[in-house]
Amino acid sequence: MLAPNRRTFLHYLSKAGLGSLLAGVALPSWSRNLDQKLEQFSSYDAYSLASEEDFWYSIQQAYTVSPSIINLNNGGVSPSPRVVQEAMKRFHDLSNEGPSYFMWRILDQGREPLRLNLARLAGCNPEEIALQRNASEALETVIFGLPLQKGDEVVLCKQDYPNMINAWKQREKRDGIQLKWVNLELPSEDSDYLVQQYTKAFTPKTKLVHITHIINWNGQMLPVRKIADAAHAKGIEVLVDGAHSFAHFHFRLDELGADYFGTSLHKWLSACIGTGFLFVKKDKIEKLYPLFGAPAGQETNIRKFENLGTRPFFIEQAIGKAIEFQEMIGAERKEKRLHYLKNYWMQQVKELPGVEIGTSLQPGFACAIGLVAIKNRKPAELDQFLFNTYKIHTVGIEWENIKGVRITPHVYTTTKQLDLLVKGIREFVKTGT
């Protein structure tokens, strides 16, 4: 059932600085419309709501996306809704009224409440979350902070994100650790296959396995918990790259099986660009070196990973409004909608001559991210055709054994926009016949 009622939603808007409970008429038109839709569809479950365009159109109005392009590359970075943008601007203006006072003595006081809210959303202890600027910073804190020795082995995948691969290669070159590579054949709907590719690479020298929760190239979801359980049974630690999973589909960190987890918040949570967090299990904090030096006395404190120096407090504090927006929609409703959108366009093109689908249609193996390729055509050709003809922004992918155009809609994407995508793919296919 759609939980927020009129009073609850107005409370969200009040907290976001967009109105008050006593002045509903002063609310922006988009928020009044969304309030009405929340009431209208209050009896719908998440699955039924996924295809209700009237409801999701009201969500679209909460964003300020340009009408001059159709942005289907939200996997790179997502826009923020109005409430987040306005909060960031308000905090930025406040900072400039007296930076050293308002930043360090006022805005910085919001970090602990923010930590609590992120932990609630993530499903973990607040003392296990450190605020970071992105997934790369969070994950490289672990990669460079683990006390690995020459000859220690790390299992990772050729389809992992380049920043993480390069970080591990630097560690290999600098410290003499050994990298053991998994090479996945994707897409896959065989959990046993995916698990076995990792577990068969484990040896008595393996100290850690690096798992990408959702492969960014094609949206493949990996069975992290099963791999983690197998690793822990052999005393192997687990690092999870959650750049594309957090706030994309519903899961809890305390159930995932990760010892370490890093994510960006400017993708699926729609927080400001340059936000993320690092999760470290409480009993792992002490042995992990921070990326930036921390003062004595913080050895067992998660805050030792936050000694960045002067940072954009106004961007960080706006994360709170992104959390409120996420909770207003609801994790399950969002997941069902994103999966629906991916399947909506894929179902219409998968039988076209020469079309190769690089992402599963099944829940549990993929969600919003989808990959499409045209036989004997380069991904860049389709990418350019879609933009030049219909101003549809996507991204061409050529990485290891994965090739195609990645399509990533978000909650503000409409099926009318995806109809245009389908039309464009059909026309491109015809140009090659």
Image (spheres, rainbow, N blue to C red):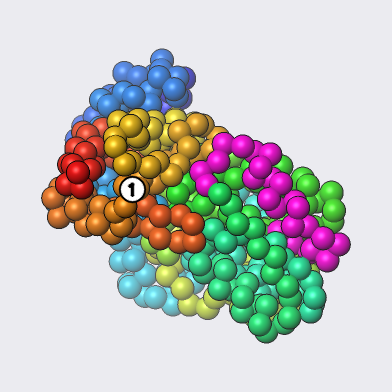
Q: Callout 1, which amino acid?
A: Lys
For residue 297, side relative to residue 44 (left or right): right
For residue 301, side relative to residue 400 (left or right): right
Q: Image point 84% across, 49% down: which residue?
A: 233
Residue 200 visible (yes or no): yes
Between residue 254 and residue 168, name the one nearer to us: 168
Q: State which region is magenta.
A: 186-209
Q: Image point 33% across, 73% down: which residue?
A: 96
**Place of residue 178 in the rendered image (x, y in percent of width and height, measured from the top left):** 73, 73
Q: Residues within 10 Å of mark 1 (few under 14, many from 20)?
A: some
For residue 138, side relative to residue 394 (left or right): right
Which residue is under mark 1? Answer: 375
Q: Residue furthest bottom?
A: 174
Judged from the image, the secondary structure of the residue bearing numbered disc 1 is loop
**Place of residue 410 in the rendered image (x, y in percent of width and height, measured from the top left):** 35, 43
Residue 107 visible (yes or no): no
How many dots with numbers?
Answer: 1
Does 191 appear in magenta? Answer: yes
Does 259 appear in magenta? Answer: no
Between residue 298 and residue 399, name the one nearer to us: 399
Quadrant holding the C terminus: top left
Q: Image point 66% across, 82% down: which residue?
A: 173
Q: Residue furthest top?
A: 43
Between residue 358 and residue 75, name the one nearer to us: 358
